[in-house]
Amino acid sequence: INAEYGEFQTFQHYFKRINLSMAHQPGSVLITGSNRGIGLAFLTLFASASKKDGSPSVIIACSRSLSAELEGVMKENANIHHVPLEVSSEESVASAFEAVDKLVGSSGLNLLINNAGVMSQPKAGSPFCGTADNLRQVLDVNVVGIQTVTGGFLPLLKRAAAASSNEPVSCARAGVVNMSSILGSCASVGPIDAGYAFG
């Protein structure tokens, strides 16, 4: 869901109603696709929780590029760090790993939120989303990208789990959240949107 569609304020308002003052909060969180939409809303939510409770102390915003909205949030929150990341590139993931490793140190990464995703517009009257190249891009980002990012940051997640072994199983120890959309469900979408579910 893109900020340019005017949806960001709606989600920001919704997320403000969520209480993050839980007993077991992550010390660090990394969010992909955090320069707009839901990713940016998650970022502002964790930033608010950090100001209130001091946790998470390290918030990592990953995206291909900075946006004016993300830069604004970063200026107001010194513990938000931007790390460039293209989720479909193993080289980019490896580079991001090195940067995040320095940020989290011996504490590791407590929470990874795989939020980055792309959506291809289907041709009118067709169940298919554009060309074969469009489909490859969707699969590279939305499917392979999740595996690449999760696998790439797994050592930091394991480090956090070991460092927080006294914590119960929760995102305060180590966890991965994979975001999706109802448009990815072949069963839930109507005939007009069916093309999205197939690619």
Image (cartoon, helix red, strand yellow):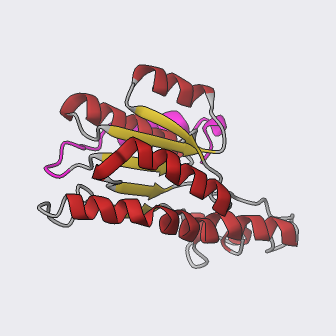
Q: Nearer the viewer, residue 14 or 110?
A: 110
Q: Nearer the viewer, residue 59 or 107?
A: 107
Q: Is residue 37 above or below residue 24?
A: above
Residues in magenta?
1-24
Q: Residue at x 64, y 54 (%)?
A: 92
Callout count: 0
**Image position, residue 182 (x, y; %):** 54, 65
Q: Residue at x 42, y 33 (%)?
A: 80
Q: Is residue 110 above or below residue 190?
A: above
Q: Residue at x 54, y 31 (%)?
A: 70
**Image position, residue 101 (x, y; %):** 43, 50
Asked if the magenta segment contains residue 15, the reply would be yes
Q: Is residue 14 visible?
A: no
Q: Is residue 3 above or below residue 104?
A: above
Looking at the image, the residue that sits furthest to the bottom is 187
Q: Quadrant of residue 56?
A: top left
Q: Residue at x 19, y 34 (%)?
A: 53
Image-based side of 21 in relation to 112, left or right: left
Quadrant showing the C terminus: bottom right
Q: Quadrant of residue 127?
A: bottom right
Asked if the magenta segment contains residue 158, the reply would be no
Q: Is residue 10 visible?
A: yes
**Image position, residue 113 (x, y; %):** 44, 56
Q: Quadrant of residue 13?
A: top left
